[in-house]
Amino acid sequence: MTQTSATPDTDGAHLVVEALKRNGVSTIYGLVGIPITDLARLAQAEGIRFLGFRHESAAGHAAAAAGFLTGRPGVCMTVSGPGFLNGLVALANATTNCFPMIQIAGSSDRAIVDLGRGDYEELDQLAVAKTLAKAAYRVNRAADVGLAVARAIRTATSGRPGGVYLDIPAAVLSEVIDGDVGAASLRTVVDPAPRQYPSDAAVDRAVALLSGAERPLVVLGKGAAYSRSEGSIRRFVEATGVPFLPMSMAKGLLPDDHPQSVAAARSLAMRQADVVMLVGARLNWLLAHGDAPRWNPEAQFIQVEIDPTELDSNQTIAAPLVGDIASVMEAVNRHPGTARIAVPPSWRDRLAEKAAANKAALSARLAVDTDPMGFYPALRAIRDVLADHPDVHLVNEGANTLDHTRNVIDMPLPRHRLDSGTWGVMGVGLGYAVAATVETGGPVVAIEGDSAFGFSGMEMETICRYGLPVTVVIFNNGGIYRGDEADPASPDPAPTRLLQSTRYHVLAESFGATGYLATNPAELGSALSAAIASRTPTLINCVIDPTDGTESGHLTDLNPVLNGARR
Ligand code: FYN
Ligand code: ADP
Ligand code: MG
């Protein structure tokens, strides 16, 4: 073949790697197979770290967590058809949680797929992804790879972040084009998430509302954590004295032991606040949609939000502050009226009193040792160890395991808690854990219900293969919610039952991790201390009383109760 330029020819796969590198992508979370195996090899050879998983869902969750932790889209790479579909839960979850992520999948021959002729792993992936992602694009020519990657990065990161799907047919990966044409087609995204300031009038309106409040409240959501604006949020909260309520993944944005935190007086704060400033938090199910009786029906809402279509989705937003949180909070802090916002001491005292009572009640529960060990004494042991390790990233999923851990374990630092999030999803655990340590270099502790662990448990091998400093603690109560449901009138176990006799620690040892069995708080505490200090893969099988646990944790009310279903 005659060379048309001085540069050697290139192909779609090389351009994908170049385009990602040029835009600062340093890690890909994926699982290889047809048609992306060489693409992964190439990425690795070119200095992009490729972390290979055992299931695409876990790889995708890792990419999503990377997006949340870094503010840049995490990249997941999957094969076509079923592998693509396995990754989609994570892409949809990233979109629901507003985390920037890109899923790149290879795909089969368009000419065959589009006529339904039955190709290998045939699926109209683009059409499927469109319904679940923030956006979905297909690259039809190798010369468009640079544009496609840039567009995916821009879409995933700007405005409300979310998941973007990039479909690359096998034929495009191997399409050879002139090297100069290829190089010229690459692009670097400039300022992927530009600042967006609110108007002066919008700031005036919000500050006026807060100034007239008798019982103001700030609700901090994971959007605030994502925006990395803890500095300006803290300045606002401390200058005004307004109490704040952290949503689950906003715990630590301001430290949980901050005197203005009303996490421990959640219901009272919601029920009585008269002006509520939502900062990167949605009035969705996690906030009872802003409805009475959980909320004061007279409450007026201020919402700091990047996506204007979120406003009024549940309650009327009296003072919208549309923009990125960092810019909005700077504008609010600069406003002369902010210095005049004052919180009546009676409101602060009422909340403080309730928080103290709830904390005392929780302390009492934590102090009682039971045999077998319950959730609370187990969490006491974990809390005491983690208090000495503020740098630990905490991953948490399950039902009771999620709810109890969230309320017992204080977070001292922003973006150090990763959990089931807006979708209440199970299966994020080990993927989130991998990303948390890969992206930060720090140690991770994943506190997992025994059921929750099952969704991504095989990634223990991944953690061992890469030698990651991850400690998985399984709260093993032998079931979903609890492990003692009476056997039904069927020869099979009850739907909620799991085998509590499972030796999860031995399973982990088979991959090369250190395994511990813990049946009391002392064993648990010493195992966890040793695990964190070792900075090596560890799994602690923490056996919990099978009678401890409530159906659906704190979400019991969401369960339809059917006649004749329970014995
Ligand atoms: C909170 N609380 C505390 C503390 N933190 N007391 C003492 N100390 C501390 N540190 C109090 C809080 O004020 C509440 O008391 C109570 O604990 C319960 O708080 P919680 O858990 O926030 O409960 P609430 O209000 O019911 O919250 C609803 C929720 C939450 C939906 C936001 O349950 C949640 O995030 N759930 C996610 C569930 C999920 O996704 N599960 C996965 C699938 S499970 P009062 O103020 O006195 O009320 C499938 O079945
Ligand atoms: P939580 O579950 O913690 O309440 P949500 O995920 O419901 O948090 O809400 C996060 C909100 O933050 C979303 O509505 C999202 O659009 C918004 N958001 C995300 N990033 C930013 C940002 N940089 N600036 C402003 N709003 C943001
Ligand atoms: Mg369980």
Image (cartoon, helix red, strand yellow):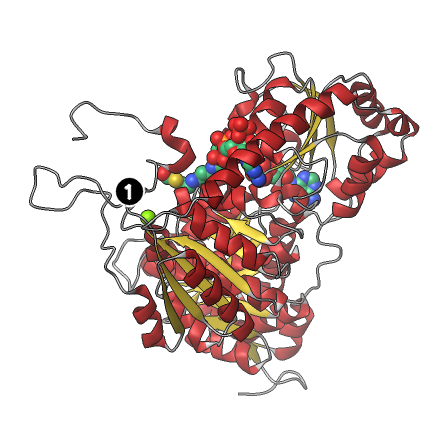
Residue type at mark 1: give it.
Thr
> x, y (%) of residue 197?
80, 38
Q: Quadrant of residue 78?
A: bottom left
Task: Give whichever of 32, 275 is nearer the camera.
Answer: 275
Instruction: Please report the residue visible at 37 percent of the width from the left and 63 percent of the height from the top.
Output: 55
Task: Look at the picture and state if 353 lies above or below 499.
Answer: above
> Which structural element holds mark 1?
loop
Residue at image point 52% right, 59% down: 63
What residue sits 71% from the left and 42% below the top? Answer: 258
| 378 to 238, vertically: above or below | below
Would residue 272 be visible to someone looking at this image?
yes
> In the rendered image of this protein, does residue 546 appear above or below residue 461?
above
Confirm whether residue 310 shows in the render: no
Point out the residue furthest to the right here. 336
- Check disc 1 and report the residue beneath it: 547
* Left or right of 209 on screen, residue 493: left
Residue 231 percent across, percent down from the top left: 79, 47
Q: Position of residue 501 (x, y in %)?
A: 23, 59
Tell me which residue sits at (40%, 66%) in the image: 539
Front residue of 196 and 236: 236
Neighbor class of circle 1 (other Cα within 10 Å; few <14, some 14-19, many 20+) is: some
